[in-house]
Image: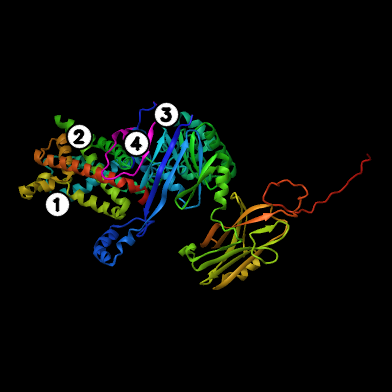
Amino acid sequence: MSDLATKSASATAQTVFIKPQRGLVGFDLRELWHFRELIFFLTWRDILVRYKQTLLGGTWAILQPLLQMVIFNFIFGNIAGLSSGGIPRPLFTYAALLPWNLFANAVGDAGRSLVTNRNMITKTYFPRIIIPLSDILSGVLDFLIAAIILGGMMFFYGFAPNQAIWALPLFMLLAMLAALGMGLWLSALNVHYRDVKYIIPFLTQFWMLATPIAYEAKEIYDRIPDSLHWLFALNPMVGVIEGFRNALLGTPIYSTGTLWISIVATLVLFFTGLLYFRSMERTFADTV
Amino acid sequence: MSEIAIQVKGLGKQYRLGGKVDGYRTLRDTLADTATWPLRLLKGELRHRAEKIWALRDISFEVQRGHVLGIIGRNGAGKSTLLKILSRVTEPTAGYAEIRGRVGSLLEVGTGFHPELTGRENIYLNGAVLGMKRREIAAKFDEIVEFSGVSKFIDTAVKHYSSGMYLRLAFSVAAHLEPEILIVDEVLAVGDAEFQRKCLGKMSDVAEAGRTVLFVSHNMSAILRLTEQSIVLEKGELVFRASTREAVDYYMASGLSQSGERIWSEEDIPADAAPFKPIAMRVRDPQGKVAESVQSRQPLEIEIEYELKQPIQGLRVGVYLQTIRGETIFTSFDTDEPKQYDKFATRAAGHYLSRAVLPANFLNEGQYVLGINASSFRVRRYFQEERALAFMVDAMGAPGMQWPEPRQGPLRPLLDWDIEQIEAVKA
């Protein structure tokens, strides 16, 4: 898309230059700020619409992770007999499902977002990143609702958060950044290749199994050679979930090294996603 | 003060043809293309696949601040592409444009409307999509609701609205946009006649308030009413710029056959017209001669020649008659009459002529345009061209010619007036 250049020639007049863009394009944070109200309204729309015409409404935000937890506990705990690191199993699973659902729902919604909002893209101008971004932001409300139950469970099992709780927002941010990175990749790909729609459910399913939600990260690290630890840690959600459990339940993080790998992987995912999205953005309106 | 608000220089937009123009690609297409690339390279087909067309080419113009510029052109002439580029929805391939001032663009009304949300919620959402600030929307909220006339249903989900209510609400939000530069595409063609009048009024207010407006419409009377200057686009190129009156006349006359006969060549006929194949459309005078000009006091014959490659069920072939300004006078089909309709329930393959006679003393003097439509109702439209052929009507000897004054209206009937003296008054 064209860049927005504001000239200071006159106080109110803004001049827009429209010309073809070549090569890599920068990212204009100032422009994003200019459109902040649109981000707000689209997030608000996504939240309003999400549970319209559902029987249970916002209850789903709680029901979804609760049911998942029950099933996971039964399969991985009762049948497979995996350890939950000395933490009550419901708490162990639920604390991981919280960021996982934030991530997985956001990736799914954001991945499809450009195509579902095709109409807006072909008729108005705004930085296109706002569309997947608002999908990710709207997931935060579900996350917060589900977090209330977590608070209740922690109280019930007598767990008080330790001093590492300050890191919780950071790990939440990390999950959102990973979701945004993935969302940018998938949504931009989806504009050209509708295959993405079919890939998303598989992807999240496999991804969930590769993420230590129902098991400890240690189980994997202990089973694979040290030289391959980085491979498992490449999954940004490994770092996020270890961080969540550490901040809330005080379970140890496997190693700072693997945590950093997750963080770096998230940043790489985010910045490459941003780059790809920006380079494809100019063709969205013509192809979507 | 002659300040330039919009400057466009050498603007062009190229689209890729070949492959799937209308749709999206699947991963399989890309994989297949990649796999067959060496083969196609050998066959020299690469260039062919990457064939490109210019939807817009070398467009340059300026608009002074406070002026209203009309953009006229046929479907596919590049009007919408031009507006999309100026609205920054899509990027140009060549050239540049400079726009000085806050731009509001209305390529459609109701962009971003969500059926599950209420009218109130949608006003805010749509306002934000159009670039209004929340405070601005809140300040104008009551005005918007009142203008739309749907205040009773403002807290009802818009999916329960009738399409008229929906459009009225959507237009109302758009009408309250107050940018320095407004870009409008064909949005007045919504709603019922009364609401359209209201919208047109609102648009002239905008124009009179000294804002710069770019205005695209098929409705020539709207263009004439709202704009002073217009540009005409033809096949992606700017071919004419003048006062709107001149531009409209230029556009109306351009590309139209004036010879009383329109013949369709192979490349004029879209592939999806088959099995219907239009051959020609003619206007004949009472002597049976193909005529570009007919007299108002004489009947005229409209003739459509076509071929059916296969039998078609329920086919109707007909004409639209329009004034040169684009107002439709009537539509008529060759199977309007029930007996005729039953007789031609299935029209066999073959070579046909459909003819109709317009009675004498029917049309006023002026220029008229004939369009053609061949379709099966609710099944398929085989072929349509709204402006296929132009012809002149001259008023020589027409009713009322004893007064050398122009008469309003497209019709000039000779009515059977009766003048009766009820009582004589002595002078």
Which residue is nearer to you in this view: B164 or B260? B260
Residue assigned mark 3: B135
Q: Which mark is residue B31?
A: none
Q: Amino acid at mark 4?
A: Leu
For the residues bearing labels 4 and 1, Cβ distance under 8 angstroms:
no
Residue located beneath label 2 in the image: A170
Q: Are marks 1 and 2 on the same chain?
A: yes
Q: Are marks 3 and 1 in contact (CB under 8 Å)?
A: no
The image position of residue B181, as x and y in percent, is 45, 35
Q: Which residue does the numbered mark 1 point to in the structure image?
A: A80
**Image spot of residue B107 (x, y percent):** 45, 43
Using the image, determine if residue B267 lies above or below residue B396: below
Q: How far from the left and from the top, in percent, is residue B385?
A: 54, 58
Residue count near mark 2 (Cα–Cα under 10 Å), binned few <14, some 14–19, many ≥20: some
**Residue placed most toward the observer, A189 or B183:** B183
For the residues labelled 2 and 4, the Cα–Cα distance comes to 32 Å
Image: magenta residue range = A11-33
Q: Are marks 4 and 1 on the same chain?
A: yes
Query: Circle 4 sits on which residue?
Result: A4
Is residue A196 shown in magenta?
Answer: no
Q: Chain of mark 3?
A: B
Q: Callout 4: 10 Å neighbours few (<14), some, many (20+)? A: some
Q: Chain of mark 1?
A: A
Q: Which chain is disc 2 placed on?
A: A
* Mark whose residue sits in front, 1 or 2: 2
